[in-house]
């Protein structure tokens, strides 16, 4: 914790204890395990928006070594894929520290097991990254305008 006595071998201005450049590199390397690198790099794709959220917009800094970083990223990709910023979800997703507190999500031991979203103002394509949530048991997009296959 950099608010306490700082180890001079660590980067204390960054809560992840790595340089901002290393945080970006490590995050990209991790996200490329679930997303196409081209989509990550292409401005305005849901993947790029989610990546930008993790690096720049998240009020609670997510570090590449965190256990839940992929889960947060995949949920952010889903949010941006379904037009989340202009939907009713904008009030509850990406705004609290713990993603398990976001509306429509159920977790067991801080791992998402269920996504239940019923909102007509959601539109878009279900992202393939959703299939990378290994403990996801149930998805219900009732009364939404989402399309595409449910990834497995």
Image (cartoon, rainbow, N blue to C red):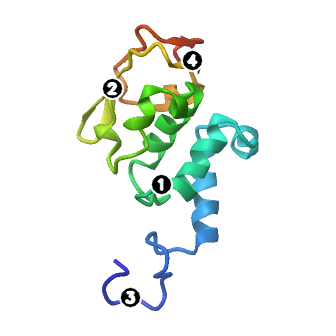
User: Which residue is found at the position 57% from the left and 33% from the top?
Assistant: 80
Residue under numbered circle 3: 6
Q: Which mark is residue 43?
A: none
Q: Residues within 10 Å of mark 2 (few under 14, many from 20)?
A: some
**Neighbours of disc 3 within 10 Å: few (<14), some (14-19), many (20+):** few
User: Where does residue 90 sit, x and y in percent of width and height?
Assistant: 45, 35
Mark 3 or 2, closer to the camera: 2
**Mark sitting on residue 58:** 1
> Which residue corresponds to mark 2?
104
Gap between marks 2 and 4 measured at Cα: 16 Å
State the separation of the CA atoms marked 3 and 2: 39 Å
Q: Can residue 98 be seen in the rendering of this structure?
A: yes
In the image, is 28 to the left or to the right of 90? right
Which residue shows up at 53% across the image and 52% down it? 54
SS of the residue at dot 3?
loop
Query: Is disc 1 placed on a helix, strand or loop?
Result: loop
Q: CA distance from mark 2 to mark 1?
A: 20 Å
Q: Residues within 10 Å of mark 1 (few under 14, many from 20)?
A: some
Inspect this view and state whether residue 125 appears: no
Look at discs 3 and 4 and give the one toward the viewer: 4
Q: Nearer the viewer, residue 103 or 121?
A: 121
What is the x, y in percent for residue 96? 34, 47
Q: How far, Cα to Cα, is label 3 from label 4?
A: 47 Å
18 vs 57: above or below: below
Label pair 3/1, CB-CB below 8 angstroms: no
């Amino acid at each position: 914790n950099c608010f306490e006595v700082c180890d001079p071998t660590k980067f204390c201005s960054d809560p992840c204890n790595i340089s901002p450049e290393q945080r970006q590199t490590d995050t990209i390397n991790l996200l490329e395990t679930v997303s196409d690198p081209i989509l990550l790099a292409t401005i305005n794709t849901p993947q790029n928006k989610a990546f930008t959220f993790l690096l720049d917009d998240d009020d609670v800094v997510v570090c590449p070594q965190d256990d839940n970083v992929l889960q947060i990223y995949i949920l952010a990709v889903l949010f941006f894929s379904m037009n989340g910023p202009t939907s009713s979800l904008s009030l509850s997703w990406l705004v609290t520290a713990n993603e398990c507190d976001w509306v429509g999500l159920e977790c067991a031991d801080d791992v998402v097991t269920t996504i239940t979203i019923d909102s007509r103002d959601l539109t878009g394509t279900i992202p393939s990254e959703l299939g990378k949530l290994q403990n996801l048991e149930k998805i219900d997009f009732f009364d939404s305008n989402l399309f595409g296959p449910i990834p497995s």
